[in-house]
Image: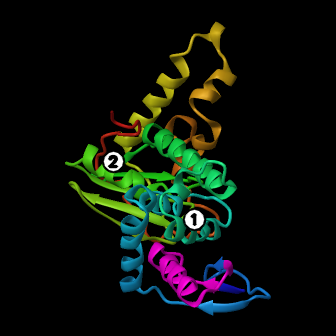
Amino acid sequence: MTAYRYDGTFAGFLTCVWDALESRTDPAAFLLPEDSPTFWEERSLAADRGRAKRLYAALARRVSPAFQKLVTRGFLTCLPEKELALFTLIRRGLQEGDRVRLDLSDPVMADVNLALTKMWTEWDHLKGFIRFSELDGVLVGEIEPKNRVLPLLASHFAARYSGERIVLYDRTHHEVFLSDRGRWRLLPAEDFRMGPAGAEERAYRAMWRTYFDTIAIEGRLNPKCQSTHMPKRYRHVMTEFLTDGEMERSLPGQSPAGSLGDGNSGQRSTSTTRR
């Protein structure tokens, strides 16, 4: 058995799958560059986009377009050892066809489906819980998701705010979404800091917090119900639960490099997600 070490990209993963299928190797693990060495024989492969595209096309042609999408989306989940699970499904799919996707009794398929359900739930939550602040004419926000949902959120926000310039940073996967009036891209970003807001933006944040604190009826306060509608794991990046200092403080170990906004220009608050 062989442990494949790849660059963490989808193209790199498909390159490893191609190699394993071609050499009839049963992968023991899929490792990222920063992962510790294992006792397995290791094979490091650079992403081969030609092979990746051919295998990706084969998933739709020989299995089904729905299976191709399942593999693509499954790679974005936080399922432990997702690469091994997806490799198992790909190998079965190329042999048996689309019935592997419909086999709900298969434990591997069940694990992937559950992971996809959780990812789509997180994606749906974040569409409503993301908070933007306007800094120097740019809408800036941060998220810290479990799954790599930023590629899925990108097209949504690029279309919804097609006339805006947007920066949305994923703290978990160190990735940033940049949109300039509908034209967007995803880029790796190890360090990110939102930077200080100007006086007008701070005033709007304060007004939003006041509204949030006063809108509830004191005699009907229900923290448990509130947690259901606004889960606590999202609150550390939500305007109404943080002070300005907490919002602008970088994560431990991050440098101020890459900060946005100098606090000198007027800002119009977009701290609540526009609907």
Picture disc at residue 89: 1
Q: Position of residue 27 (x, y in %)?
A: 66, 80
Q: Residues within 10 Å of mark 2 (few under 14, many from 20)?
A: few
Q: On the picture, is 168 further left or further right than 19?
A: left
Residue beneath disc 2? 156
Q: Position of residue 229 (x, y in %)?
A: 57, 28
Q: Quadrant of residue 233?
A: top right
Q: Quadrant of residue 243?
A: top right
In the image, what residue occupies the spot 68% across and 84% down? 3
Judge whether residue 195 can be spotted in this image: no
Q: Give the quarter of the figure containing the C terminus.
A: top left
Residue type pointed to by label 1: Leu
Q: Real-space Cα distance between discs 2 and 1?
A: 29 Å
In the image, what residue occupies the spot 58% across and 50% down? 113
Question: What kind of element bears circle 2?
Answer: helix
Give the number of the mark in front: 2 or 1. 1
Q: Which residues are magenta?
A: 4-29
**Mark positioned earlier in the residue sequence (2 or 1):** 1
Q: Quadrant of residue 201?
A: top left
Seen from this angle, which residue lies furthest right?
39
Q: Are marks 2 and 1 in contact (CB under 8 Å)?
A: no
Q: Position of residue 111 (x, y in %)?
A: 65, 53
Q: Is residue 14 magenta?
A: yes
Q: On the picture, is 27 further left or further right than 239?
A: right
In the image, what residue occupies the spot 58% across and 66% down? 86
In the image, what residue occupies the spot 41% across and 54% down? 152
